[in-house]
Amino acid sequence: MIRLLWDDTSTFRGELKKVTHQQVPLLYDIFPKTKRGQQKPMKLEYQAHVKAAVAGLLAKGDFMHDGKAEQDRTNNLTHPAIGEVCRIFFYGASNKLGHEFPNEFGSAVPDMAIALVITAIKCALDEYKTGSLKKIKFDSDTYKDPYEKAVALIEKIKGDEYHGAKFQDAQREWAMSSMNIEFDASTSDCGFEIDLS
């Protein structure tokens, strides 16, 4: 199903790219931070910081991993950004794929969906590779190889007893926490207060 959507539906890719493009700056530390009262970096310094941060994330696919765990072992393919983009894009509303196809998405985010999200995150990071935002088309001609590499990495991870178990735990956690979202539209007791004294 994911392969069909990837190949045939530019709207699907466009929506995924939009979500990913919004989340990448929030979930990765690519922009320089300034403290209150501190002078903002000049344009060239800003661009150099962004370029270096993105290069570091793209090097060896570090953007996919969530640091190290016990025994100094890498948390492969479990960066919180992957889970968050999956949650928003596949489960964020009742008409999203996760809810429309609970047999495929209900107990774990499918491998191919995760590979697609990893590829979309790579595209969003690629847009900042020069230090400034330069839009890149998210299409199969450009991103077929990274997608296939992500699929192969998932297969390799799942073949490892330790890392496969951790990855599958993440897949289940991302799906289960997304499927159990309760929407409460009530505003009767929202906790807002004002003091006019």
Image (tube, helix red, strand yellow):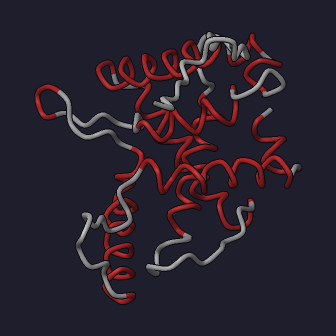
Q: How many marks?
A: 0
Q: Quadrant of residue 3?
A: top right
The correct choice, above or below, for 22 with respect to 179 in the image is below
- Residue extending furthest toward the front: 197
Q: Position of residue 180 (x, y in %)?
A: 62, 10
Q: Residue at (45%, 30%) from the top-left corner?
A: 197
The percent position of residue 164, horizontal first and vertical second, equals 39, 23
Residue 183 position by quadrant = top right
Foreground pick, 24 / 37 = 37
Name above or below for residue 122 compared with residue 157: below
Residue 96, image x and y in percent? 79, 28
Indicate the quadrant containing the N terminus: top left, top right, bottom left or bottom right.
top right
Taking the spot 39% from the left edge, 81% from the top edge, the residue there is 47
The residue that appears at 50% across and 53% down in the rendered structure is 24
Task: State the image coordinates of residue 112 (x, y, percent, origin top left).
Answer: 64, 34
Name the side, left or right, on which 8 lies relative to 56.
Answer: right
Residue at (48%, 57%) from the top-left corner?
Answer: 25
Instruction: In this rendered view, identify the residue nearer to me: 57 or 134.
Output: 134
Horizontally, residue 142 falls left or right of residue 130, namely: right
Residue found farthest to the left: 71
